[in-house]
Image: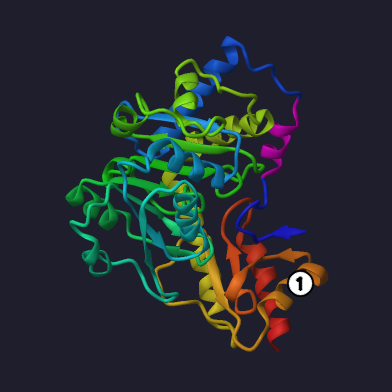
Amino acid sequence: MKLFTVGPVQMDPAVLEAGARPLPYFRTAEFSEQMLQMETQFLRLLNAPPESRGVFMTASGTGAMEAAVTSILNPDRDKALVIDGGSFGHRFAELCELYRIPYVALQLPFDADLTEERLQPYREAGFTALLMQQAETSLGKRYDMTMAGRFCRHEGLYLIVDAVSSFLCDPLDMTGCGADVILTASQKALALSPGLSLLALSPRIIAERLTDQPSRCFYLSLSRALDNMKRGQTPFTPALSVLEQLAYRLQQLDQLGLQAELNQRASLAAYFRQQIRQLPGLRVPGYTLSNSLTPLLTGALDAHDLFVDLKDQTGLVVTPNGGTLAHNLLRVGHMGHLVRTDYDALIAALKTRLA
């Protein structure tokens, strides 16, 4: 079986082997040293500002989103603007609703990009934070982080970015865009097992929201995670096998170089999209795309039936969609241990089904 999914993804056998080794005991100086080294490597990949800190939490990406909302935002002092352009943007809105954070959702139509014109009505409206994805995973739509950062600087907002599917696929400069929180997860372009979230925290957010503000969640407290990370530890038992995979993967990225990794994702995305445009019956939407995945509108074909047929008959697994797009849209991932010949096999299988 070959995974063209958007998490979990096809994993490098060497990464799998790293996670299969006997687990270390983690309350040791050696483990702390490894954790602090991984923090440095992670922050370097994001070009995080000096004095930023990184934390690793045993949770999915949604857990990291919830940690950001509950640890940073306060019902009595905040008003959030949420970019609701798909199911993951809507998840930020749901979290604000659950924790009674006043918010307004900027709802983007399916085919629309996030532009300065769309943000203009939300200027000088009392917001304190902007919550958004860099890439909306449900659609493969990429937002302009430079423009979003400029808006936040002008308005004095905290910028909280879900980069779960875009990290290592699309360029992301934490210093350049002025993000205060960037969160991602292990099972996307890091291409590790699920179960680990990584968050980068700016000096501003640490000083203003994570130093004195009491936590509203016990397990997902960023303040508690930050305090423990100062000594290279986690407050609770971490996902040790995934951390071992992360240590291997970060060393691999150090050797390969960030730009080479970004180029590889961009190359695979461009190759697949070039091939797919030659197939009748499938269409790639016209909005700005992330290199993490390609969304396919299936026209007269039922998208879910096509997903099942590919999986059961060829062992090629793409990503189905839920909700209103369940029968109209498939997503083909460009993350993980994939090469061009893998996409040749997928294109051939699609051609057969479109004939």
- Name the residue rendered at 34%, 32% in the picture: 209
Q: Is residue 263 left or right of residue 340?
A: left
Task: State whether residue 291 appears in this view.
Answer: no
Read off the residue under disc 1. Answer: 308
Q: Is residue 43 left or right of residue 311?
A: left
Residue flagged by tag 1: what amino acid is it? Val
Horizontal and vertical percent position of residue 238: 63, 28
- Name the residue rendered at 61%, 24% in the picture: 236
Q: Which residues are magenta?
A: 12-21
Q: Foreground: 48 or 118?
A: 118
Q: Is residue 180 above or below residue 330?
A: above
Image-quadrant location for residue 242 = top right
Q: Is residue 17 above or below residue 328?
A: above
Task: State whether residue 23 appears in this view.
Answer: yes
Q: Is residue 347 above or below residue 91?
A: below
Dominant secondary structure of the magenta stretch?
helix
Q: Foreground: 281 or 269?
A: 281
Q: Is residue 160 left or right of residue 197?
A: left
Q: SS for tag 1?
A: helix
Image-quadrant location for residue 144 = bottom left
Q: Residue furthest top?
A: 29
- Quadrant of image for the C terminus: bottom right
- Quadrant of image for the N terminus: bottom right
Neighbour tally class for label 1: few under 14, some 14-19, many 20 plus, Cα within 10 Å: some
Q: Is residue 253 above or below residue 28?
A: below
Horizontal and vertical percent position of residue 249: 58, 36
Horizontal and vertical percent position of residue 175: 29, 40
> How many numbered marks have been drawn onto this rendered protein structure?
1
Q: Foreground: 120 or 39?
A: 120
* Colouring rule applied to residues: rainbow
Image-quadrant location for residue 328 = bottom right
Residue 144 highlighted magenta (yes or no): no
